[in-house]
Image: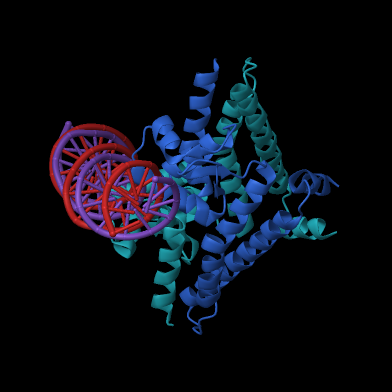
Chain colours: A cyan, B blue, C red, D purple
Amino acid sequence: MDYKEAKDKFINTWGSLGSLWGINKAMAQIQALLFISTKPLSMEDIMEELKISRGNTSMNLRQLMDWGIVTKELVAGERKEFFTTEKDVQELARIVAKERSRREIKPVIKVLAEVSTIEDTSPEAKELIKQTKALHELTETADEMINKLVNQKQNWITKSLVKLFT
Amino acid sequence: MDYKEAKDKFINTWGSLGSLWGINKAMAQIQALLFISTKPLSMEDIMEELKISRGNTSMNLRQLMDWGIVTKELVAGERKEFFTTEKDVQELARIVAKERSRREIKPVIKVLAEVSTIEDTSPEAKELIKQTKALHELTETADEMINKLVNQKQNWITKSLVKLFT
DNA sequence: TTAAACTTTCAATAAGTATTGAAAGTTTAT
DNA sequence: ATAAACTTTCAATACTTATTGAAAGTTTAA
């Protein structure tokens, strides 16, 4: 496999994997491209490399910036904007985990809390309460765990793994 | 909030959350319905409750069974088939985590391994190799961690949380 | 067997998402 | 101020994915 092949394979795999971490294809591909680039890229560069439109590039870059994964970079003597992504995988994972907790997990916890505290003593309601309570507890614990993991700055994932083995 | 409201809210929230754990809306809704049901439900019951077609119900039930989350139940004296879902949230989480590891994470690890071992000494290739290697390592460690967590049968999530706090 | 009861399959279609491209908006240099 | 260089917005459209429903398939009871 030569460089070009490997690069395309990486960008495509990462792109189609977007769903796993909750973002769309173009967004994931742009991030992937920046992630392996040796220098900041302009919108033009990204459009060219990924063969996507200006509008698409602009919108997805904005989203990546909203996530806090991509930042604008000023390049001396250049008028247009350049972009880079967080290059440290651990920091990247930390940002993604935090955002997903905030955007997706927290709202669900809220709904589960509401649903699990209705006042109704019918057997069906009792089952609903019991099951949503269990789910609420699990989700909260998992979310707490993620935040715990994610806040250990140095080398968190390896450290955590070690702990779990003891 | 009365029972019906609470139930619908739960089913809808769970349904729209499907994407978070990698399944589609109808699939997630069927699972949610079974999860809070006091007894096994027939296809008819499910269609009726969720207002979805027979075909849709059939296909999504099959998928849920493929995932190992839902099982057929024989009800004495009844000709049609009835379905139940795993009722223990921890067991449920375990199954989902395992399946996602197998279906999504493992294949990505394979691609990252391939891409990160190309032979090319150009600066761009070096960066590609360096970054995909880091990603490979992180993904493998995370996957290992998930599998580790998931294999502790009893009360895994709470136990793990405790460990991480030490 | 036969036929009723039930389930699955799958082509057609609907619904949901992503993408384009051109017009409108903004910034910078002169 | 003007205009060139650049970015954003958004209605139209393409693409993808989910859903329907009816025909085909299967199982069971008599």
Indicate left or right for A31 with B150 as reference.
left
Give the residue at x 46% y 44%. Answer: B79
- Residue B87 versus residue A119 in the image, above or below: below
Residue at 66% from the left image edge and 42% from the top image edge:
B89
Q: Position of residue B58 (x, y in %)?
A: 40, 47
Q: Is residue A6 above or below residue A144?
A: below
Q: Name the residue rendered at 39%, 70% in the picture.
A: A8
> Residue at (60%, 42%) from the top-left corner?
A98
In depth, the one of A163 and B4 nearer the eye is B4
A41 horizontally vs A91: left or right: left
Residue A16 position (above or below residue A116): below
Tell me: residue A123, above or below residue B45.
Answer: above
| Nearer to the camera, A149 or D16 | D16
Direction from residue A20 to residue B162 in the image, left or right: right
Q: Nearer the viewer, residue A114 or C11?
A: C11
> Residue D20 placed where, x, y %?
27, 39
Picture quarter containing residue B47?
top left
Can residue A13 be spotted in the picture?
A: yes
Residue C6 percent across, percent down from the top left: 40, 44
> Could you tell me residue A85's position as x and y percent?
50, 55
Q: Quadrant of residue B134?
A: bottom right
The one of B16 and A130 positioned closer to us in this rendering = A130
Image quadrant for the N terminus of chain B? top right
